[in-house]
Amino acid sequence: MKYSTLGNSGAAVSSLALGTMTFGAEADKQTSGEILAAYVEGGGTFIDTADVYSAGASEQIIGRWLAANPTEAAQLVIATKGRFPMGDGPNDLGLSRRHLRTALDASLTRLGVEHIDLYQMHAWDAHTPIEETLRFLDDAVSAGKIGYYGFSNYLGWQLTKAAAVAKANGWAAPVTLQPQYNLLVRGIELEIVPAAQDAGIGLLPWSPLAGGWLSGKYRRNVDPTGATRLGENPKRGMEAWDARNADDRTWQVVDAVAAVAKAHGVSSSQVALAWLSAQPAVTSVILGARTVEQLNDNMASADLALTDAELTSLSDASAPRVDDYPYGVAGADQRGRKIEGGR
């Protein structure tokens, strides 16, 4: 396992984080405990959860495990999130000081800790002034309730604005961003990745296997069956399945991943994860596992070294399609790149 600092902070975390959205849902208490134990045994040090995961059950399961394993717990960096509804009242959601104070205290209680290492805003809140949110987070750092803070699912301009406002006011700076990022979803490279690099913010990609698409389990025009991250009948109600299945790019990427996996004698999942870990600004890739077997296979990606040629072949096969203005050739001059032949 490799380790790096958490964005522009001095805290070190493992290159693979354990996402716990399955805890209390697809993974019961016993299985969740086994996953936690296997992750720590494999050298993992970074646990990610959220208050809304299984309506608080994920945080509770983690809290009980931490209490039962104090030696291991002392080495872990714990991250959680707040923003989405945990009640029916008008102030039971959002990024206001009123809601975040309640949400943070509730997360501390469920986790059974006095301090959360990384507290993340789960999504942008257009109804709350960014100054209010950032001042609360700075106060929480000063009070010792959190060590650092970050964001999830923010756009490039939102990330840049937050970092600029924090700096202008002398408040604690954000250190991380959690975006969806994988070989099939690379749109963040257009503006979000540059914004994160500019602000010294580390990326914590979620859905690194694109909901299982990059694991090699799906076949073209073959309806998926059985238990998956999409449910027992993953095609039912999943219009996205038909769209991805019909898209030639999907299978171009899947085939490219499979070819590299075959050359190394490893799973497609390991190749997809190794590619993502090698991307600029990525601090730690968030793994989601329903079983210990899945986790162990994914964690083996930490030992997989892809060649420059393999990384390039995967990047070429999965290149995001950005042809419309202001992107592509039509917008190159707007990005400071010369266009032959004039404007």
Image (cartoon, rainbow, N blue to C red):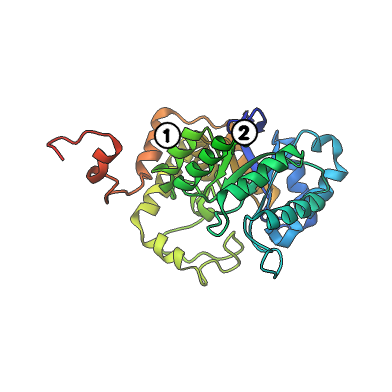
In the shown orientation, is residue 144 left or right of residue 285? right
Q: Counting residues from the N terminus, which is met first, the one under dot 2 or under dot 1? A: 2
Residue that appears at 78% across and 41% down: 115
Q: Is mark 2 on a helix, strand or loop?
A: loop
The label nearer to you, 2 versus 1, is 2
Which numbered tag is attached to residue 311?
1
> Looking at this rendering, what residue extends furthest in the left direction?
341
**In the figure, 148 relative to 239: above or below?**
above
Residue 99 image offset from top left, x and y in percent: 69, 58
Residue flagged by tag 1: what amino acid is it? Leu
Residue 313 image offset from top left, x and y in percent: 37, 37
**In the figure, 218 relative to 42: above or below?**
below
| Residue contact at pointers 2 and 1, CB within 8 angstroms | no
Residue flagged by tag 2: what amino acid is it? Leu
| Residue 280 in view here | no
**In the figure, 252 relative to 277: above or below?**
below
Residue 34 image offset from top left, x and y in percent: 77, 48
In the shown orientation, is residue 172 left or right of residue 268? right
Residue that appears at 52% across and 72% down: 236
Of residue 329 and residue 66, the one placed in the foreground of this image is 329
Residue at the disc numbered 2: 6
What is the distance, in whole Å, between disc 2 and disc 1 at their CAs? 24 Å
Q: In which quarter of the image is the N terminus?
A: top right
Q: What element carries label 1?
A: helix
Residue that appears at 38% across and 34% down: 312
| Residue 342 in view here | yes
Of residue 133 and residue 57, the one placed in the foreground of this image is 133
Residue that appears at 29% across and 46% down: 327
